[in-house]
Amino acid sequence: MTADGPTLRLAYLYPDLMNLYADRGNVTCLDRRCAWRGIELRVATVAWGDALHEPQDIYVIGGGQDRQQRAASEGLTRKHADRIGRDIADGAAMLAVCGGYQLMGRSYRDADGTVMHGLGIFDMETVHPGPEVARCIGNIACRWEGAHLIGFENHGGRTYLGAGARPLAAVVKGFGNNGEDRGEGAVAGAAIGTYLHGSLLPKNPHLADHLLTMALRRVAPEYALPPLDDDVEWRAHRAALRIAGVSERR
Amino acid sequence: MSRLTRRGGGTAISGLVAQALWPHYVPDALNSLSRLVLVSGTNGKTTTTALIAASLRAAGHEVWTNSTGSNLERGLAAALAQRAAWHGGQRRERSAVGVFEVDEWALASLLPRLSPTLVVLLNLFRDQLDRYGEIDTTAGAWREVIAGLPDSATVLANADDPLVTSVAEVHPGRVDWFGSDRLGAAAELDPWADVRGCPTCGAPLVYDAVAFAHLGRWRCPTGDLVRPAPDVAIVAAQPRGVDGLDLTLTADDPESEVEVPLPGLYSAYNVAAAVAAARALGIGPAEALDAVAQTGPAFGRAEVIPTPHGEIVLLLTKNPTSANQVLDLLAAELVPLDTLILLNDGVADGEDVSWIWDVEFERMRPRRLTLGGRRAHDLALRLKYAGVQPAHGSVAVEPGIAEPLDRALSRADGRLAVVATYTAMLDVRAVCVSRGWTTPYWSDA
Ligand SMILES: [Zn+2]
């Protein structure tokens, strides 16, 4: 297929530090779904310490181990806060998963009590209750926009949203943000944060296309995203829902 | 439990009973052996344990081992109880040498209660994160128990793994090393490599050569952690597809070449570890290599099973590193093989199947391709995004084990490679056993 469609710029943040749960599958997914439609997706891989001058339409960041997350927090706040903050304020889309999600809040206090600063894209704080408290691990399903999101979660930190943030989805099975208020993830403008990995986007093609739609709204407001044959995607989505013990109809 | 027991060859119950009656059963039984060798690490435990046991047997020792791969405390209890029953008591153990593979976390909990002669640390890869948390956490737990070992114990460790090096160097006693020399060309880590920073200072590691994953000849730019010179080094390794490997090793003296029936570059590390272990136990490298060359594959490691519809070759995968190694192995076949991939999400497989997005299926060129296991549809999705197109027919997707096996066999032409996660491997072997194509694993050991 020729790339006669619009062009999107995606920054994949810190894959050298933050790819704990194969989160790069999300980038693979967006890349393929653009290519199949003739949309040119220019992926900039931003390693820790790399400069990022060009504005972006989509940001993607995954999860990492505590030590890598500390380095990512330092790099993000010192070097990339400005660029990312300006683009998100201007309507750019974001998918921040797990550890990357935590760093898009105001702060994260990890198991050792070390406080990492975040970018404050989402009005939220994350606290790790300590190494002796069980992690939130397992298949997770939630309701989002009249449909399901399905993934796997594995996090020690508990996230609490402030008045300026709303959850992405409602937990049907699993823990979500904190295992208490049934909220999962956060939304601010076109930015999405979530604890779901899996990789998330391939098995949730409606969410993948939602991100692309939001990113395109700014770049090519007239452009309508052509539908794809998502038979394989929905089979995997439904199979994973069944394995999580959630029936398709609500 | 009973299902696991049957599939695993009926070894768990007696161990459970022994452990319940006598909580110190495992440490007491292990400590009463004449010498005790423990093998741990993410990948290669079963094979390396089998190779060390073979070298010791060739040198005339009686060896106790857990050849079924039951490597948690409960499984060790089972292996010991079975042995004890075999000998009608525990009296003969004083002259026997124990060689046991131990799960990474079981090692951390057992080691303070054991007095081992030799502890072999193979590698640390991302594996079953839902069970273990993170590999830095595993390394931290190992460091604690290795630092507490008595001086009398020897530690043997992989010099090519920076994380394992940072663990072994805290041992106050003798440390031997195995690793590579002149092996590997690429100096860039794959994007899915688990360790990229120095375990001591966090600085990005520099690689003069990468063997695979984060194994290779690495350097920390600040110099606070230094790769030790291996006592036993792999100098050359030429894979022969699923059939084996031509290997050249050095140990103290001139290079020795050996043909081993174990496939893949990862086998080279297992052989080097076994030769180095034998050396630490006073067995000459030549004698150890002879024994190694005659050892067949361990459970699911390129085991060949004849069926009425043609041969199948079983290839176990557990994590991105071993899966990428298996794909390399298949790519080294002159003629692409018909392939069946089985993905399960049991506790022993990792309930989180996200790791398949770190497997480079993009490099797969199968002749025919069938997908199965409990997570067959996840696999189908991954392969769609990898753009994998079999040379013949379309990708067949069939959740389960026996159904996709039959489907793959019915259309296979020649050998069928069966790539499976741990419980899928147990299941597919059980199907082959029930049809009389092979025998249960424990009884042919
Ligand atoms: Zn260092």
Image: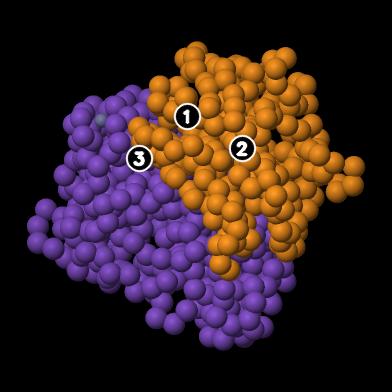
Residue position for label 2: A93
Residue B124: % across, % down = 40, 42
- The structure residue drawn at horizontal position 57% and vertical position 20%, both measured from the top left corner, is A120
Left or right of B428 in this view: A20: left
Between residue B96 and residue B409, name the one nearer to us. B409
The kind of residue on which mark 3 rests is Arg
Q: Secondary structure at mark 3?
A: loop
Co-location on one chain, circles 1 and 3: no
- In space, the residues marked 3 and 2 are separated at their CA atoms by 29 Å
Q: Which mark is residue B196?
A: 3
Instruction: Give the class, few, some or many, for how many residues have Cα within 10 Å of label 1's Cα (few <14, many ≥20).
Output: some
Left or right of A148 in this view: B21: left
Q: Is mark 2 within 8 Å of ligand 1?
A: no
The N terminus of chain A: image quadrant: bottom right
Query: Which chain is drawn using purple?
Result: B
Instruction: Give the class, few, some or many, for how many residues have Cα within 10 Å of label 2's Cα (few <14, many ≥20).
Output: many
The kind of residue on which mark 2 rests is Ala
Residue position for label 1: A83
Q: Is residue A169 visible?
A: yes
Q: Which of marks 2 and 1 precedes in the sequence?
A: 1
- The structure residue drawn at horizontal position 41% and vertical position 35%, both measured from the top left corner, is A53
Co-location on one chain, circles 1 and 2: yes
Identity of the residue furthest to the right in this view: A250
- The structure residue drawn at horizontal position 34% and vertical position 54%, both measured from the top left corner, is B212
The kind of residue on which mark 1 rests is Arg
Q: Is mark 1 within 8 Å of ligand 1?
A: no
Between residue B136 and residue B296, name the one nearer to us. B136
